[in-house]
Every structure is written in C-alpha cells, then in structure tokens.
Amino acid sequence: PQRVKPTLTMMTTRSQIRYEPKGVVLIIAPWNYPFNLIFGPLAAAIAAGNCAILKPSEFTPHTSALMKEMVNDLFPENEVALFEGDKQVAEILLRRPFHHIFFTGSPAVGRIIMRAAAEHLTTVTLELGGKSPVIIDESAAIKDAAEKLAAE
C-alpha cells in the first residue's frame, strides 16, 4: 500500500492506495481485428493481476483456433482460458458471475451484456461500435459501392 495524505474532510484518518486485482475478467471480442481486440484487453487484465476467460467471435473460426492454441501454449488453464463457439457459448458464459466483463462489439449486443452483468452487479467496459466511415470519391462505381454498403 502507498500512504497518501488524507483529504481535509478525512484528516483524522490514515489514507492509502492499494492496487488489487478484480479477479476473473470475461473478454468478448468481435470478428474485426480479432487479435488486437482480444489480446489488448487480455494484456491489461493480466497486468492488473487478473485471470481471464476469452470468447472470440464465432465468425473467425480459424483465427479463434489459432488464438486458442496460443493461449493453451502460453498460459496455465487456471489463469487464461479461451472458449470457442457461437452465441450460445457466450450466453452460457454470461450466466456466470465474473468480476469484470470487457466487450467490444455492437450496441445491440452491448445491451445484452449489460443486462447479464446487472444480474451479478458485475462491472463492465463496453466498447461499442457499429459506425464504419466510408469515403467514396469520383473514381468509385457508385451503384456497386452503394449496394455493397447497404448489404453490410
């Protein structure tokens, strides 16, 4: 613990800062930038002294398999574990009482994550996206670009 000077309202007490891990962190990552968006939060969780459960997107099965192999090679299973699978796997994980949930993805799924976290009063970090800017210049095939964007 690091001793610090108490505030004026607490001047009759002793104050200190303690760095304590949260516990087990659930990290759910999307299909885009799968390595960055799962291993970035994992590095932060480990640096803070936490264990982690990872759930990559089911839309990147080959990448998920490679990440699982890496996690299994690098970490003891009681410190970091990766679960592959679809939406049902995520739903099963979300029923468990984690100490923190880190999610990157859509606002719609973010609401589901928040509701599940509320059941256990779990803190969350929601990195919600869904807005991908596109620049179309005069060289573009406008009809083709519009059809591709509308399909997303």
Image (spheres, rainbow, N blue to C red):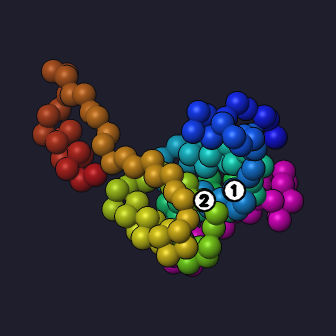
| Residue at image coords 51%, 51% | 125
Of 55 and 113, nearer the camera is 113
Residue in the foreground of this view, choosing between 124 and 133: 124
Left of 42 or right of it: where is 110? Answer: left
Residue at left offset 82%, top offset 64%: 77
Q: At numbered mark 2, what does the secondary structure look like: helix, strand or loop?
A: strand
Please indicate whether residue 17 sits to the left or right of residue 55 in the image: right
Where is residue 117 shown, x and y percent of the image?
50, 68
Q: Nearer the viewer, residue 41 or 70?
A: 41
Question: Is 86 colored magenta in this rendering?
Answer: yes
Q: Which residue is mark 2?
A: 100
Name the residue: 52% across, 43% down.
33
Between disc 1 and disc 2, whose residue precedes?
1
Please say whether residue 53 is one of the residues in the magenta stretch. no
Q: Residues within 10 Å of mark 1 (few under 14, many from 20)?
A: some
Q: Residues within 10 Å of mark 2 (few under 14, many from 20)?
A: many
